[in-house]
Amino acid sequence: MSKRKGSRIKMLVIILAVLVVLITGGAAAYLHGIGAVDANSDETVTVTVPSGSGASAIIDILDENGLVRNKTFAKIHARLGGYDSLQANSYMFSKSMTLPEMMEAINTGDFDYVSKDRIIIREGLTIPEVADAIAAEMPFTADELIAKWADTTYLQELIDKYWFLTDSILSDGIMYPLEGYLYPETYFITEEDPTIEDVTEVMLDMTDSELSSRKSEIEKSGFTVHEVLTLASIVEREGSNVSEEMPKIAGVFINRLDQGMNLGSDVTVCYANQKTSLELTQSELDIDSKYNTRKYAGLPIGPICAVNGSAVDSVLNYEKSDYLFFFATQDGTIIYSKTNEEHDKAVQENKWY
């Protein structure tokens, strides 16, 4: 082999080596450039993607929010990534996320990353309390919510839409028509400008889901949906601190209903007076209200609070017994009695309010 030929081969090897280094280095630089800004960061940033934004514009938005390591490589990735269904919304991204992860989330509108207004509705809350919880997170007041929920035209639209809503919610004497029907849950509202109707129907959709799964049991129970929710709401308030006792408490109330006795539930009297304390004056105990189960036999006219599936199940699958009375002690222990004499003795020995 001639020296000239050997030199050419050596040169080719060097050139190839340089190309490999350049290609490898370029690939490494590209991967580094579209990587996380800080892989160990816990910091999250909220970014808003306007409607109609293209991939390049989104890179600009991400870069402005400190989520892009190398804008040049990010633009190349955006051009080559095939992101053709980018979803306008507000997103919450961590600085530990890579560019492809963020772009994929935007391209699919991944709900896990959508910035959401969170509303927490707990079981046992009354409509005024539910309205307060929603108003704290939404662009409308509690008074506006309550007014909308009392609008008979709107309520009739809801009755026409949801199978479980009936004219019972419009009965004379009902304080809040949707009491007991707005399911307690944590809700994430993703609409940019949510309305009262949006929020209400998200909650009613959840109620629909929960009740539909129990529809056959409700039909076999001998109660209407309204009656099931009414009794479940009483059980919820009476047994809120001892959920495992709810089926037994429900059984006591059903025994009293079967025997034509007044339910005699103080939580219904509290609701009639719109107070939470169990300390009731004689005039409060005597209030003339269709919610007062001390004064009127049978179930009250409607639910007294928000109820979850467990409370509904406690009514549909109540525990059978011979008990007609119960009393909750200060530590939450429930004392059950079969006779009025036994009950009076339990109250005298354990009353704490």
Image (cartoon, grey):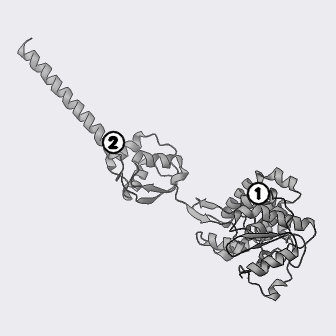
| Closest to the observer, 95 or 243 | 243
Task: Return the residue nearer the eye: 42 or 263.
Answer: 263
What's the residue type where badge 1 is placed?
Asp
Q: Position of residue 39 (x, y in %)?
A: 36, 51
Identified at 23% across, 35% down, the residue is: 22
Instruction: Judge left or right: residue 24 versus residue 295.
Output: left
Q: Which residue is mark 1?
A: 313
User: Quadrant where the N terminus lies?
Assistant: top left
Instruction: Give the quadrant of residue 31.
Output: top left
In the displayed structure, 204 sits above or below 269; it is above
Which x, y percent locates residue 263?
Answer: 86, 72
- C-alpha separation, residue under disc 1 versus residue under disc 2: 54 Å
Residue 220 visible somewhere in the drawing: yes
Q: Are marks 1 and 2 in contact (CB under 8 Å)?
A: no
Residue 232 found in image quarter: bottom right
- Disc tally is 2
Q: Residue 278 versus residue 25: which sits nearer the camera?
A: 278
Q: Amino acid at mark 2?
A: Leu
> What residue is pinned by disc 2?
31
- Mark with earlier residue (1, 2): 2
